Amino acid sequence: MARILVMIPSGEVYGRDNVRWYRHSDIQRSINSYHNIGDAFVFDSSLKLLSYDKLGVLEISEFKPDLVDRLRDEYDYVFLRGSNYIHNSMNWEQAVPTLRRLGLPIIGFGIGAQAPAKGKIQLSDQTQELLHLMADSTTSIGVRGAYTAEVLGDIGIHNTRIIGCPTAFRRNDPELRIKLPPLDSIRKVGITIRREVSPDYAKDIGQYLTFHRDLVKTMARRFDAVLMTQGEVEEKKLVLGTETQRDDAMDALRAHPWTAAWYLDEEMVRLYCERLFYSDVVADYEELVRSLDLVLGYRLHGNLMALANGIPSIYFTYDSRTVEFAETFQIPSFDVFSGRTFVPDEYLDQSLFDKYNRAWQRIYVEMYNFLTENGVAHQMINTGEPQSISKVA
């Protein structure tokens, strides 16, 4: 058992290893702010893999030497929840002086790099310093995929291990496999939607949203579909808001230059009013995906929650992050900028998911080895001979 600090958590913990958004029952408290509940999936999943008897939060907004000195004596290591931290505009606030004084191992738990739509990634001095602090404090850094490992290699960090994301292994079942149901038995389908996307990463917003709209409509006509959202304000209001807030949200969607009448037509309005799902509780998403036959769409962690529960999922890639993730796990995926027509039946092929199953098994071992070689107490099951970082870096 260990005493662990988490840096940049995403939600409050209840029942040891379950996560929900802060004061989740007070809906109005955060109804007007965006928070990606997918980040809470990762936090929740990380805790499910770790063994610990004390959990604390390392605040990085201010540098407080006296507090840091106390935490050093009370905890064994810090983990940085897996997310998209390595990009051109990341602000680490006071993390560098805080971590430098703290002097504890800093576990990078599936962190990822994000390439801009144009040009090459340019990391700030602050980001590079923090990454070197992390690399120097541990045997290895757990990264999302090959692209992130390459970005770190370019700044002289080579002790990386590709571990994907803790969400993939949240059930901690090394025998988990995706087995497709017969095509004609698929009835209930989840579509993970992402209406808002940064033009810094998606190279053509118009093309992205056109494909997004057509996919939602096509799948909803064919299946009993639920539109799974993860935190955009308007979608949140449509699901959890008051009547006035729902009306305001629809007005805002209709007025938004990205979702004008060409996108939010009569059919999409009906689907948004009748088929949206959102919750501030991670367990609610897990319960939902377990009731579905298939999940497909844009949300990296929404799709992965399905796969982690044995439900087939198809990824729609549109930036380096989604591409890297699909490549790491060999997840069946479709490039929204390819100009091709998506035909669901072509992706509902067991041979494609067998590739995923094999990759998942391999990365499960990598995750086990990563935690073990860094001295992190965990609950994962040893399925093979541990491999040293020198053999895989």
Image (cartoon, rainbow, N blue to C red):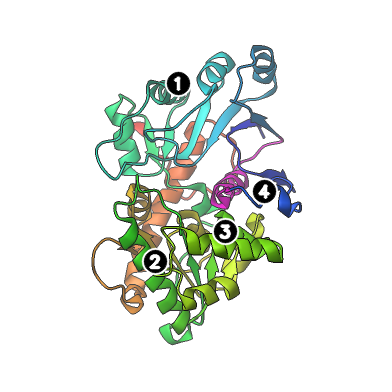
Circle nearer the N terminus (1, 2)? 1
- Tell me the quarter of the image containing the C terminus: top left
Residue named by callout 3: 234
Residue topped by disc 2: 212
Q: Do the residues under discs 4 and 1 have CB atoms within 8 angstroms?
A: no
Classified by dominant secondary structure, the portion drawn in magenta counts as: helix
Q: Where 154 sits versus 19, above or below?
A: above
Q: Which residues are magenta?
A: 34-54
> In this view of the protein, which residue sits in the foreground, 74 or 302?
302
- Residue at 43 percent across and 69 percent down: it is 261
Residue to which mark 4 is pinned? 30
Instruction: Tell me the kind of residue under disc 1.
Output: Leu
Amino acid type, callout 4 = Ser
Which of disc 3 and disc 2 is earlier in sequence? 2
What residue lies at 51% left-to-right and 47% top-to-bottom? 166
What residue sits right under mark 1 in the picture? 133
Identify the mark at residue 315; answer none if there is no mark.
Answer: none
List x then y, in percent, for residue 144: 40, 43
Residue at the image point whose x is 38% and y is 73% from the top: 214
